[in-house]
Image (cartoon, rainbow, N blue to C red):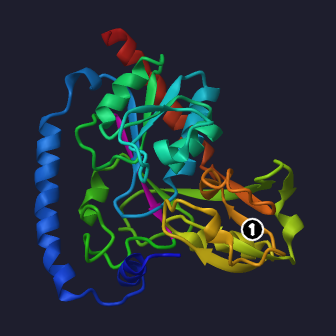
Amino acid sequence: MRTGIEARLNAIWYENQPAPWWLRALVPLYKAGNRLDRWWKLKHQPEDLKSVFIIVVGNITAGGSGKTPLVIRLCQILRQAGFRPGVISRGYGRQDSSLRLVSPASDPGKVGDEPLLIAQRAGVPVIVANDRCEAARKLLQQDINVIISDDGLQHYRLPRSLEICVIDGSRGFGNGSLIPAGPLREPLNRLRSFDQIIVNGEQASLPDDLPFISMTFVAGLLRSLESGQSWRLAQFGGCKANAVAGVGNPARFFNLLNQARIKTIEHVFPDHHIFSAADFEKMDPALPILMTEKDAVKCKNLGLSNAWFLSVDAVLPRDWEINLLQQATREVRREQVSS
């Protein structure tokens, strides 16, 4: 279940509970440190990566916003167009700090749940490392011509050709305050510097003159952790089930299940939670367990006999995808000429 600290912060950030004075007092320190960190990292960007076409996908709020499905979709459309994309990530929550090439069979504890999911779904080289510049150089050795950074908008040492900010439309920017009094990693005026703003789901409160692209999620199949058997989500309609979510915004997953007329018993865990068999012992064994695909990569070896995971796909406007491919073509050609 969510830790007491995480639940308390979510209540302050997203449920209009007032932030205590000591959290508000820390905001100026965070803001000053953020400015210093950005200045230093921009000053020390490596020259050898400035000619590479690098797409950075991230957000300015703490927690999930839908970045991973977007990264997977970007990899898919780039591959289909003949590009050779690869993904770099820090691998948040992993128990290993070394640089690692992620395979579909990697240990999620060593590479992180999101990089493993990307490797499984996108079928592209994925490298995790604390230093994203080091990861990018290693990725280029894999004959890659487009690098996608999963998260990393605030990792300013990494040069970037295109910055994409993803916003969770249902939660927006919470109370609008910087960490730790609110969920913002950077001030809201940072929005005006992004190349693209993508709103996941419902429209967040954005300035009227700020253009954005809408992204939606389409539910795929429910797949058995044990056998790989797949069912349509509608086939569970009218059933009662344990719904497990260890993601940034679990309500989005629960809503998908409820819309399919599934009667859920909700079990909320911290984002990037490392699951164990004990997490499931108190759940009714007569009911199926439904979970997100991100959580499933950490549960496949727990011996759960009636557990299913739901895959989701990001859907973007076709015109936007075409424009992205045109930009990729220009940038990769420029890189080839310069080299």
Q: Is 239 displayed left or right of 74 in the figure?
A: right
Image x and y of residue 295, in percent: 61, 58
Q: Is 49 displayed left or right of 81 in the figure?
A: left
The residue segment tinted magenta is 160-169
Q: Residue at x 60, y 21 (%)?
A: 82
Q: Secondary structure at mark 1?
A: strand
Q: Which sits in the foreground, 226 or 210?
A: 226
Q: Residue at x 11, y 43 (%)?
A: 40
Q: Quadrant of the C terminus?
A: top left
Q: Is residue 124 above or below residue 11?
A: above
Residue type at mark 1 is Ile
Image x and y of residue 307, in percent: 76, 62
| Any part of residue 266 in sight | yes
Q: Residue at x 23, y 88 (%)?
A: 20
Magenta span has 316?
Answer: no
Magenta span has 167?
Answer: yes
Q: Is 183 displayed left or right of 104 in the figure?
A: left
Image x and y of residue 317, in percent: 60, 48
**Magenta region, main secondary structure:** strand
Residue 254 lies in what quarter of the image? bottom right
Q: Is residue 177 above or below residue 307?
A: below
For disc 1, the marked residue is 289
Residue 294 lies in what quarter of the image? bottom right
| Any part of residue 331 in sight | no
Q: Residue at x 15, y 74 (%)?
A: 26
